[in-house]
Amino acid sequence: MSKKFFEERKDESEVKARIVNKYFAAWAQVVMPTVAKRGRKIAYLDLYAGPGRYKDGAASTPLLILQTAIENPQMAQMLMTYFNDSDGDKTATLESEIQNLPGIGKLRYKPVVTCGEVDDDAATYFNETRLVPSFSFVDPFGYKGLSLRIVQGVIKDWGCDCIFFFNYNRINAGISNPNVKTHMDALFGEERADALRARLPGLRPELREAAILEELANEIQSLGGKYVLPFTFRNSGGTRTSHKLIFVSKHFKGYEIMKDIMAAESSTQDEGVPSLAYSPADASMPLLFSLTQPMSKLKEMLLKDFSGQTLCLTEIYERHSVGTRYVKRNYREALSALEASEMVTILATKGTRRKGTYPDHVMIKFGEC
């Protein structure tokens, strides 16, 4: 029985599952209207699905996704689900859990459960097969099977986004381990992996983490994933990163939705700016998260980066927020402060505006620095 169920849930597992399920629901609402006009389907792909429940009986991601679809009549008629795992005991348990899920008969398409390794053949299949609009979740144990060719394949088509999860500690240790060179090269690309092997020795832990994430994001972007957004999980003491959840999309709308979701799941905020991280220790160490004054930095960046320009809030947010922790409300707050101190000029092109609001017809003019 121990092989058929996940170990006891950790807070990290709950946060991860909520992020995936919240984005799936939001993603589906965005793509379904367009897909419905074409009489097509949407899909959810989980390549390392597990058995469906933890030992304490709580549902894991596959069952949460199916429950979301069951509760939405339109989604129930359009969604195809594909669950895979390399462990036959887990897939057998998952099939049983799915069959016993209340309301499962409401789904037009029966969930598909397969058992197999996610290997080069799988990567080739996804890269050569045109996918319906799909949201994919890749959550391997460790790094075996975590290939960016898989990510490239599952995001290449219209309406396709992906999240993958990995153990940062194992990746960090594996970069310089010749015994797992093949796996590291599959994740970063051989050229970037070699660059990391040369660059990482001697770097402090926080700089190693930044360098690894930078190369990973650069490789994803080179493969077509224009928007890359990481969410960090820290260890029980809050001192080191344990895991990373990486979101990949080709569209800013998806990036914006996911950032708002990750912001809500962040365990701390500094001046209203979310950490985009979860740490069990955050509640006991509040001083660690009140020293950076990110809103002051945002105001300074806006004045510098948009010097002499006139733009609306939406344009500012889309051009400036990528690669930062800032969400749209942070930009609204920063602009309100700059307006109050007369450091920007507000130009309303039509009608009136409520103070502190910046609809698209309201332009913000930045002075020359």
Image (cartoon, grey):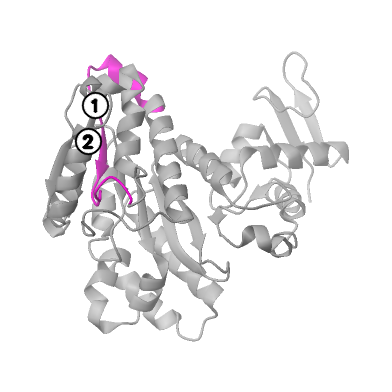
Task: Please state if 305 lies on the left or on the right of 188 as rendered.
Answer: right
At x 14% / y 57%, what residue is drawn? Answer: 117
Where on the picture, by quarter, is residue 250?
top left
Question: Compared with residue 241, is residue 339 higher up or lower down, i.e. above or below?
Answer: above
Query: Residue 318: x and y, percent?
Result: 56, 39
Q: From where the camera sits, is residue 293 visible?
A: yes
Q: Provide the residue span drawn in magenta.
A: 30-54
Tally of marks: 2
Label 1 belongs to which residue? 104
Q: Amino acid under label 1? A: Ile
Mark 1 falls on what kind of element?
helix
Residue in front for this viewpoint, 134 or 288:
288
Marks 1 and 2 in Cβ contact (< 8 Å): yes
Residue 367 among those drawn in magenta: no
Residue in front for this viewpoint, 204 or 88:
88
Residue in front for this viewpoint, 303 or 89:
89
Q: Report the disc number at residue 98.
A: 2
Q: Residues within 10 Å of mark 2 (few under 14, many from 20)?
A: many
At x 36% / y 23%, what residue is drawn? Answer: 71
Question: Compared with residue 327, is residue 353 higher up or lower down, i.e. above or below?
Answer: above
Q: Amino acid under label 2? A: Ile
Return the disc, 1 or 2, that comes first in the chain's sequence. Answer: 2
